[in-house]
């Protein structure tokens, strides 16, 4: 019988591999780990995270030759999840028609998309478009949101849960990026 799955989602850590390790240390037993790009890891680091079970997406600041993929698709408890970084599909703050075309291509090939996960903007988002929910966890290493007046010290990521009846919930988590 299916049970609720826990998914750790990070994005845009921008060389702050230490923060990626911190997230892993804080959540050692999630069912899935997803990074949505721009870790700027080298090949060795990418391989290490992939061995730990991470799904790793290529961002516009990542090297093309370190073993990352531009897009990924998985289903968790029957929820179809399409993952991408965002540089190919977000233009001037709007999702492009290219993204709609790509989603249609997946759907026509029997890969239903209920949820799109992406990063790139460094700003948390949660909304609906083209019969899918779109969620951006925000940036772990270079937050552009200010949570406390002019305080940009909090990197952010997300712990998502998907229940057997496809209910998607999440908790936003914050890490002080200047803490050693
Ligand atoms: Mn970025």
Image (tube, rainbow, N blue to C red):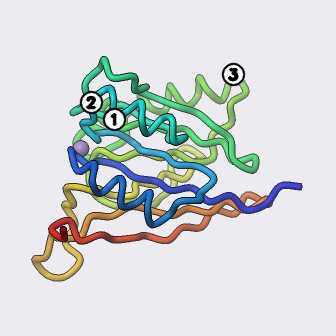
Residue under numbered circle 2:
42
Which quadrant of the frame does ligand 1 lie within? top left
- At 44% from the left and 57% from the top, the residue drawn is 24
Q: CA distance from mark 3 to mark 2?
A: 33 Å
Task: Judge left or right: residue 180 versus residue 116.
Answer: left
Indicate whether 165 appears above or below 92: below
Q: Which residue is mark 1?
A: 45
170 displayed left or right of 173: right
| 3D distance between C-alphas at marks 1 and 2 | 5 Å
N-term-proximal mark, 3 vs 1? 1
Residue 164 position within the rendered picture, expressed as x and y whole percent measured from the top left: 79, 59
SS of the residue under disc 2: loop
- Label placed on residue 109: 3
Q: Which image quarter holds the N terminus? A: bottom right
Measure the alpha-carbon separation of dots 3 and 1: 33 Å
Under 8 Å from ligand 1: the CB of mark 1? no
In the picture as drawn, the residue positioned furthest to the top comes out as: 65
Ligand 1 lies under 8 Å from the Cβ of mark 3: no
In the image, which disc is placed on residue 77? none
Label 1: how many Cα within 10 Å (few below 14, some 14–19, many 20+): some
Q: Quadrant of residue 109?
A: top right
Residue at 58% over, 49% down: 32
Mark 3 burial class by Cα count in 10 Å: few <14, some 14-19, many 20+: few
Q: Nearer the viewer, residue 98 or 142?
A: 142
Which of the two labelled residues, at mark 3 and mark 2, occupies the earlier sequence position? 2
Are circles 1 and 2 on residues that touch, CB within 8 Å?
yes
User: Residue 88: image x %, image y %?
Assistant: 33, 29
Which residue lies at the image location 45% right of the left edge and 60% below the top edge?
Answer: 126
């Amino acid at each position: 019988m299916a049970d609720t799955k826990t998914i750790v989602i990070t994005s845009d850590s921008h060389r702050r591999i230490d923060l990626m390790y911190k997230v892993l240390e804080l959540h050692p037993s999630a069912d899935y780990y997803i990074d949505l790009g721009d870790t700027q890891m080298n090949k060795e680091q990418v391989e290490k995270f992939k061995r730990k079970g991470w799904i790793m997406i290529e961002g516009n600041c990542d090297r093309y030759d370190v073993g990352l993929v531009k897009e990924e698709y998985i289903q968790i408890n029957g929820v179809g999840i399409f993952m991408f970084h965002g540089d190919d599909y977000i233009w001037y703050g709007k999702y492009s028609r290219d993204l709609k075309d790509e989603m249609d291509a997946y759907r026509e090939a029997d890969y239903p998309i209920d949820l799109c996960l992406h990063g790139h903007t460094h700003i948390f988002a949660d909304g609906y478009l083209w019969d899918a929910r779109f969620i951006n966890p925000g940036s772990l290493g270079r937050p552009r949101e200010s949570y406390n007046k002019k305080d940009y010290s909090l990197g952010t990521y997300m712990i998502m849960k998907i229940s057997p009846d496809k209910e998607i919930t999440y908790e936003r988590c914050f890490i002080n990026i200047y803490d050693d």
